[in-house]
Every structure is written in C-alpha cells, then in structure tokens.
Image (cartoon, grey):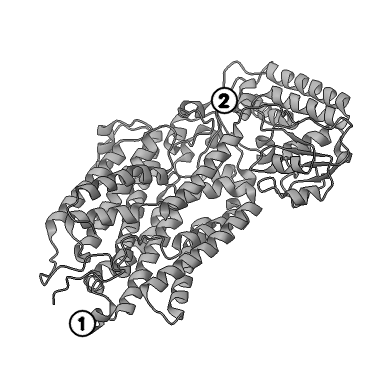
Amino acid sequence: MTVTERRPGHDIPVAPGPRPARLRAGPLLAACAVLAGAALLAVLVGPVRLDPWAVLVELAGRLPGVDTSSGLSDQEAAILWQLRLPRVVLGGLVGAMLALAGAAYQGVFRNPLADPYLLGAAAGAGLGATLAIAYGPGTSGWPVDLLPLAAFAGAVAGVAAAYALGRSGPARTTTSLILSGVAVAAFLTAIQTYVQQRESETLREVYGWILGRLTTAGWREVVLIVPYALVSTAAILLHGRLIDVLAVGDDEASSLGVRAARVRLVVVAAATLATAAAVAVSGLIGFVGIIVPHTIRLLAGSSHRLLAPLSLVAGAAFLILADLAARTVIAPAELPIGVVTAIVGAPFFALVLRGARRVP
Amino acid sequence: MPVRRLLIPLALLLALVASGCGQDEPAPTAAAPAPASRIVSLSPTATEMLFAIGAGGQVVAVDSNSNYPEEAPRTDLSAYQPNIEAIAGYKPDLVVYSDDPGELAAGLGKLSIPALQQPAATRLDDTYAQLDQLGRATGHQAEAAQLTATMRAEIEKIAAARPERPLTYYHELDKNLYSATSKTFIGQLYAQLGMKNIADAADKEASGYPQLSAEYVIKADPDLIFLADTKCCGQSARTVAARDGWDQLTAVRSGDVVALDDDVASRWGPRVVDFLKTVAAKVQTLEPVGS
C-alpha cells in the first residue's frame, strides 16, 4: 500500500513506501563509538584533576588477570570509583532511558511533541518526591532512602491515572489520552505546589530535585535503575516493528492484524517504567526525550527498529556529555544538569532542524 | 512544555537565592511613633529578636516558621504567601517581615498598617541595627542596646580565642552539596574564628551559595564539616559517613562532623552567639588555644 496523504493530527510522516526498514549495523556501531568516547572522556575529566594515564591503568587493573599499580592515592581512587564512575554510568543509564522512552512515546502517540513526561510521569514523580521530602521520616531513621521510591511510585501512578481516565470516555483516541495526561498533571502539580507552600522549609530540596541532579549519584542508584532499564529496553526494542505499523493509524493497523491499543499499552507501560526509574534517581531532566529521538530521526530515518536502539545509545552519550559540562564548566561548583541539557540541547536541536532537508 | 516546567522552578530558585543575599536597606517605612503594642512578625529572626529584647508581650501573632522561642504565638500565617486579610485580622499596629514576595508592603499600605522590613542580614552590623530598630519601634530601646552590647562582647571574646592555624571547613546547606561562602552572613561568622571556607574557590559567579562537586569536597578534605541540613533533610554524621567516598574524609574518620540546628544556622538573630559558641567549642577540640 502507498500512503501519501497526511492524516490530520498525525504529524509524523507515514513510514515510507513498501521498502521494509532493515536494521543496519553501521549507524548503531557509530553511535556506540560516540558513546564509548563520551564515557571515556567523562571518566578522565572532572573537577578534581586525576592523571589520565593513572586512571586508565587503575581501570585496567580491575580487569581479570591484570595486576597493575596505578599510583593513585586512596583518596583519588575513591573519587574515581565511588564518585566519578557511578555518575558516568548513571548519567548514561538515565539518558538512555529518557531518550528511549521519548522515542517510544512519540511513536505510539504519533505526536512529535510527546516526551517521557507527557502522561503525568513528571507531575506524579514530583508529587511523590515532594511528599517524601516534606513528610517522610528523616533519612537517618530509615534503612532506605524514601525519595526515589516515592518518585518512582508517583510517576507510575500518574501515568496509570492518565491512562485509566483516557480509556474511560467514549472517545478512545490518542488525543483523549494525551488530554487526560494534561489534566492529571495539572491536578498533581497543584497538590505538589500546595504541599510545597505548606512545608516551605522543603523548597530548596524540592527545587533541587525538580531541576534534575546526578550530583550525589552512587552505585546504589545504578543498582536501583538497572532492572527496570533492562525490562523496558527489551520490551520497547521488541516492539519496534509494531510501533512502525501504528504510524499508519489505528484502523489501518488493525486491518494489518496489529492490535493498536494493546501495543500502545505495552509500549507506554515499558516507557513509563523507564521514565519512572530515571526520574527516581535523577529528578526531572528535561529535553533529552525530545531532542535525542528527533535528532536521530533526522539523521537515520523514522523506523523504530533503528530509532529505538539508536536513541538509547545516543541518549546515553548525550547525557554523559551534558553532565560532564555540568560538573566541569564552573568547577568546583556544579551547574544543574537540567539547565545544561536545555542550554546545550535546544540550540543544537535548532541547528539539526535547520540542516535537515525534511522536517518530521 | 518541559521548558516551562523547568524555567519556573529555576526562576523561583534564583529568586530564593537572590533574596537570601539581598543588600540591606534599613526599611524606610516609618514605624509608628507610639510603641507598637499589637505586632505581627512574618520573620522567624524578627520573632526571636522581639522576644530577646523583651517585646514578646506585644507580639500577637507570628508566622508558621517562627518556631523560637517556644512561647511565641505561632499561627498559620505564611511568610512565603502572605495573606493580607489574615494578617489584618489580628489588627496589628506593626507588621515585621523579611521578604516581600509580591504585594505585601503595598497591601499593608492600603490598609494603613505600619510595616517594617528587616531583610536577611549580610553583616553582623545589620543584626545590631535591626535589633536597635525593633527596640525603638516597640519601646524597648534600652533592652535592645543592652542585648547588642552583650552580643558584641561575647563575640569578641570568642573571636579572641581563635586558633593560630586556620582550620578549613565545609558548611552544608543540603545534601546536594549546596554551601555558603565566606561572603555570606554565616560565612562571616566562621571567619570570626579565623576559619577557611572550602566553598570560596567554587564561587565564581559570586552567588555566595554555590553547589559543590562531591569530588571537590573529598579532595579539599576539610578539617571540619558543619551540617545545616539536619532538620530539613535528616542529615547527620552517620548519613554523611555513609555517602559514597566520604569515608575518605579526615573529618568523617575523626568524628569532626558537627550537626547544627538548621534554624540557628540560617537566622541572623541573637542566637548567632550560640552558633558561634558551638563552632568555637568544636574548634577548641582540634586546636586548643591558651593551654
């Protein structure tokens, strides 16, 4: 079938023609190379100067069968292993999850403005985090930090509420789902603002969380996010072809034997899990979920079989580099990571758009 | 959509920081000529000052954050979103406030309620000036003068016992490692003891309240760590020791992490003397003077 007309409200160009999108290894390898370079640079450079050669030797020393002495002091080794490395790993994971979730949301909603926070994930996480900060028992009284758990639960609950609301009415369209997301987000944000005003001593911490942070990242956070990251990634990558089919519209998709609502539910659930896990450990980092998938789409086409894995890898590289800027530009002070992704990301995205021959 | 979501809190955060280091300008608003007898305080510091100079009996209501002293008539009044009608309901003849988030001064002016702004102090002299101002407004000028004289003498005594080796310190405002430099009010108090602030190197944009990199704190390895986030954020010597990599710090290993009272460490009232005594006592254990 050839579809050339643009359906109103469906802004992503319909998957072109009969040629099936094949998974090409070239772009993926290139993206992985960029990611490896970004990660290496981020490990070598930081607010405290560590001898790059010693860092490389120290890293190599952890490989099985290699026994070397890097000459790093205990203090420097702690900076490398307990502060810098987990932060790079976590930045990569968070960036990967947000970009992947963004690509998935844009695909299933056929809406280029969809981002991982679209359906109330951000508002729900914000409320959860605020409640944990305002009313949670101090960290000292609890074996676990309540904040990430509350943010995670809030994000999942926010999206679940939006989904339930969007599916309850007579018009079960993606638009009604998005509008439910807007309503849920507004409602949750209102409660969050109210709590924040009541408990004004929490203002600073809540804003710090909203602006996004990787500053206190450790291996704990990495361990927290990895299981969700694996599950969501597998689910979304396996649905890449089905997301492509959704691009022709729900009715056409069902005539092709694809149950659009079910695919959408699974992909949204997986993307929500990814977003919630990312938000739980890093707060609200904006733009990654919009900028990265769109840039990839412009460079490598819009088939989700390629877009999803490329967004994953590029998102990781992007956030690792953004965080590198956040911790080095005004070192030894820090910039909020959300500010960096916006300041660097928005103009970069504008450049990509200008250079693109076709605009999604 | 995400742009707005990020920019609004950012603007608020900046406003918060800016208000924290705003220049002092002794409020031009004239206090009532007769001593005020029905005072509403929207500033926890002003509340402490009023009670310290013996004007507590004239205070009819204080805002929700004025938790000291115990006998202060605490209400639900918010200093962040002041409700002018609710304030007027107490029929005050003087409203003392620190920050005007919007229409507070204008609103009180319309109702002809005298108002006195006492912004966050940037120097100890501001504290003394504000005490004096409150003394005059409430008819407790002599007590105010007495109090400032005592404070000056005590602080002088504490400063005289400063150690020869300047100790380095890190003052933590929250667990995201926001700190305060020597230029801030609290930083100047530490400077009285000849202490060196590790946050000074990080304050290139001169906000006074930089966010430090964890790597940098570990590298700087301060002699002392002061936590001003014990009440807000549940931090303690134990939670600090549990942070990744922080077991490397000398202060953590030798038990030199001091849990402060957030309120005392963030206000500029008479309890700054208590704060200095706490710090001085700790300094004394590391660098005994006069032995």
Label 2 sits on a secondary structure element that is: loop
Residue at x 74%, y 18% (from the top left corner):
B157
**Is disc 2 on the same chain as disc 1?**
no
The residue under label 2 is which amino acid type?
A: Ser
Residue A188 % position (x, y): 54, 63
On screen, residue B97 above or below A232: above
Whole-number angstrom distance, CA of label 1 to CA of label 2: 69 Å
- Report the side of B244 relative to A11 (left or right): right
Disc number at residue A45?
none
Relative vertical location of residue A50 with respect to residue A234 in this rendering, above or below: above
Residue A59: horizontal and vertical position, in percent?
27, 42
Q: Nearer the viewer, residue B286 or B226?
A: B226
Outermost residue on the front side: it is B110
Quadrant, the N terminus of chain A: bottom left
Instruction: Name which residue type carries label 1.
Output: Leu
Check disc 1 and report the residue beneath it: A256
- Left or right: A275 in relation to B28: left
Q: Under tag 1, what secondary structure?
A: loop
* Residue B182 - label: 2
In this rendering, the answer to whether B66 lies above or below A246 is: above
